[in-house]
């Protein structure tokens, strides 16, 4: 089946970059600024969304999402390219990003939320995060339906993130936007293809992408490659949506670079492109040119490779229905969420007792298939003694149950659960045994960092390789981790 919803993924991710380039090339023109403010006021669609207002000069979070709704599709050509609205109903958001801006630092931090993250919805049920945008989905115990407001609720409920501005993008032909800028150079280290999107790279090394070919690249979720073109079989990338996010982030930086050095310096071309970008946007009511300017100024950089883009860390798992989902690594994700809330990570105080002094029981109360076994294996690998595994009734909140004299042991266990869970005294447990009841808020096991090693913030990290593999004899540009962050290095 064609993956046409992926068309809008690129547009959503790169719309901001297009606006950045526009301001870079026209900011010195008074009438350019007038046009920009007028375009922001008139071009985007506006929707009522309960964003959290902040005072001027304070850090803000821009929620940037996309819709795969085909409600706008009318012609046969559009049905062929994007899908038939009569058979592909509803809407979801396949990618969600938060752009965090701190005016004092004058730079942005962008965190991507993969579409398969398993989260809790208002009403207590659980589903992949991309269902939050679907108006047909809601918990049976809640009347709050999907849509922009639901995404804001999910962000607050699961991650403690306040959203201050909202931007979303529907299907548009980004191909024309790319072609208006020109072409983009990407370094592809191997022969590569995606039979779903039509991508085919026959020559490893620096490749030039026009709008059509770029669309195939940024849509790719079934990426395959060969380290030798004579190989009979293609090697699967196997990273799915996470790999696609990495490639899109690489493309965003590369296209920003291409735009800076191309026809975007031509004012008429810039106006044409900015209109296309803004017409694809939906923003909250009250969103004005100054709000967009703040977003643009934070991205204002002569080095697109310096844009800090990261992805919520998660592991592949299964839910109660056997569907593949992504389970957040709470310990690793906490510092990232703290950056979005401007709160430093509080070091967890770890009792000075060995893990081998605690026997752990695990009960599955969150409905995620295999969660108890996985949790037990993780804990025993860190030195805890294996106890019993079982299932129990649904729990929204994780519980760490302990004999009345074992509060210190329970606190130790909690430290290894990213400080998640309520401590509950339980006289039925034998001394030395701590029972973990996994709740919907459970996010995995990780060795805690001490007060001397836990940073107040996470430093910028280089994105993983844009593509897997490498063809022998093909010289990779000299860049970080052996892969270019922007263009061909």
Image (tube, rainbow, N blue to C red):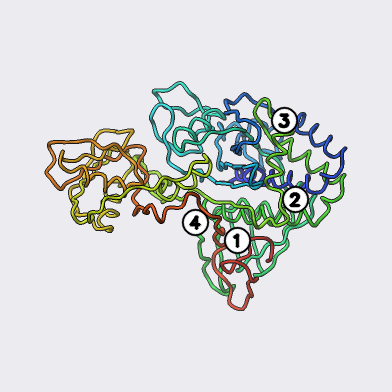
Mark 2 crowd level (few <14, some 14–19, many ≥20, 10 Å Cα)? many
The residues tagged by marks 1 and 2 sit, at their Cα atoms, a distance apart of 21 Å
- Residue 63, image x, y percentages: 59, 37
Question: Is mark 2 in CB contact (under 8 Å) with mark 3?
Answer: no
Estimate the x, y position of residue 226 in percent, counting from the top left. 56, 69
Q: Quadrant of residue 35?
A: top right
Q: Name the front one of labels 4 and 3.
A: 3
Looking at the rendered image, the disc whose residue lies closer to the viewer, 1 or 2, is 2
| Label 4 CA crowd tier, 10 Å (few <14, some 14–19, many 20+) | some
From mark 4 to mark 1, how far is it between C-alphas? 14 Å
Give the labeled residue for mark 2. 178
Mark toward the start of the polypeptide (2 vs 3): 2
Q: Which residue lies furthest to the front in this view?
A: 452
Residue at 59 percent across and 66 percent down: it is: 480
Check disc 2 and report its element: helix, strand or loop: helix
Residue at mark 2 to residue at mark 3: CA–CA distance: 26 Å
Q: In this view, does 256 lie to the left or right of 379?
A: right
- Give how far apart the Cα atoms at labels 4 and 3 are: 38 Å
Above or below — where is 155 with respect to 208? Answer: above
Callout 1 secondary element: strand
Q: Nearer the viewer, mark 1 or mark 3?
A: 3
Residue topped by disc 3: 288
Query: Which residue occupies 58% across, 69% down?
Result: 482
**Residue under label 1:** 193
Whether residues under marks 4 and 1 lie with C-beta atoms below 8 angstroms apart, the answer is no
> In the shown orientation, is residue 165 left or right of residue 43?
left
User: Residue 324, percent across and down?
Assistant: 41, 46
Q: In this view, does 378 lie above or below 229?
A: above
Mark 4 sits on what residue? 239
Determine the secondary structure under disc 4.
loop
Q: How far apart are marks 2 and 4 (CA)?
A: 26 Å
């Amino acid at each position: 089946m064609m993956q046409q919803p992926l068309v809008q993924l690129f547009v959503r991710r790169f719309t901001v970059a297009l606006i950045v380039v526009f301001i870079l090339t026209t900011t010195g023109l008074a009438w350019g600024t007038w046009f920009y403010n007028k375009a922001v006021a008139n071009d985007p669609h506006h929707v009522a969304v309960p964003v959290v207002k902040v005072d001027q000069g304070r850090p803000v979070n821009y929620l940037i999402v996309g819709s795969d709704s085909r409600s706008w599709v009318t012609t046969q050509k559009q049905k062929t390219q994007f899908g038939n609205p009569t058979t592909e109903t509803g809407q979801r958001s396949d990618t969600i990003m938060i752009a965090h801006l701190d005016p004092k630092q004058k730079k942005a931090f962008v965190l991507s939320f993969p579409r398969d993250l398993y989260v809790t919805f208002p009403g207590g049920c659980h589903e992949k995060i991309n269902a939050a945008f679907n108006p047909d989905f809601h918990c049976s115990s809640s009347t709050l339906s999907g849509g922009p407001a639901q995404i804001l609720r999910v962000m607050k409920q699961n991650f403690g993130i306040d959203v201050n501005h909202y931007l979303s993008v529907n299907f548009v032909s980004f191909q024309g936007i790319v072609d208006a800028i020109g072409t983009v150079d990407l370094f592809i280290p191997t022969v590569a293809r995606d039979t779903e999107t039509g991508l085919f790279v026959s020559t490893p090394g620096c490749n030039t992408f026009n709008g059509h070919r770029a669309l195939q690249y940024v849509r790719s979720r079934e990426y395959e490659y060969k380290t030798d073109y004579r190989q009979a079989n293609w090697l699967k990338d196997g990273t799915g949506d996470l790999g696609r996010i990495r490639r899109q982030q690489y493309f965003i930086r590369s296209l920003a670079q291409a735009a800076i050095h191309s026809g975007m310096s031509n004012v008429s071309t810039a106006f044409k492109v900015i209109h296309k970008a803004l017409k694809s946007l939906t923003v909250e009511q009250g969103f004005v040119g100054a709000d967009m300017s703040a977003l643009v100024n934070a991205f204002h950089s002569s080095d697109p490779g310096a844009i800090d883009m990261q992805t919520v860390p998660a592991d592949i798992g299964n839910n109660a229905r056997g569907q593949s989902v992504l389970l957040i690594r709470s310990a690793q994700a906490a510092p990232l969420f703290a950056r979005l809330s401007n709160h430093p990570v509080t070091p967890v105080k770890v009792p000075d007792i060995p893990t081998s002094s605690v026997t752990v029981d695990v009960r599955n109360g969150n409905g995620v298939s295999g969660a108890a076994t996985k949790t037990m294996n993780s804990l025993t690998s860190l030195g805890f003694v294996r106890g019993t595994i079982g299932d129990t009734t649904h729990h929204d909140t994780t519980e760490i149950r302990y004999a009345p004299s074992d509060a210190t042991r329970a606190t130790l266990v909690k430290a290894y659960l990213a400080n998640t869970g309520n401590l509950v005294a339980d006289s039925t447990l034998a001394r030395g045994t701590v029972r973990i009841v996994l709740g919907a808020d459970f996010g995995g096991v990780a060795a805690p960092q001490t007060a001397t090693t836990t940073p107040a913030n996470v430093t910028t990290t280089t994105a993983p390789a844009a593509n897997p593999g490498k063809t022998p004899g093909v010289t990779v540009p000299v860049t970080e981790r052996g892969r270019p962050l922007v263009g061909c290095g």
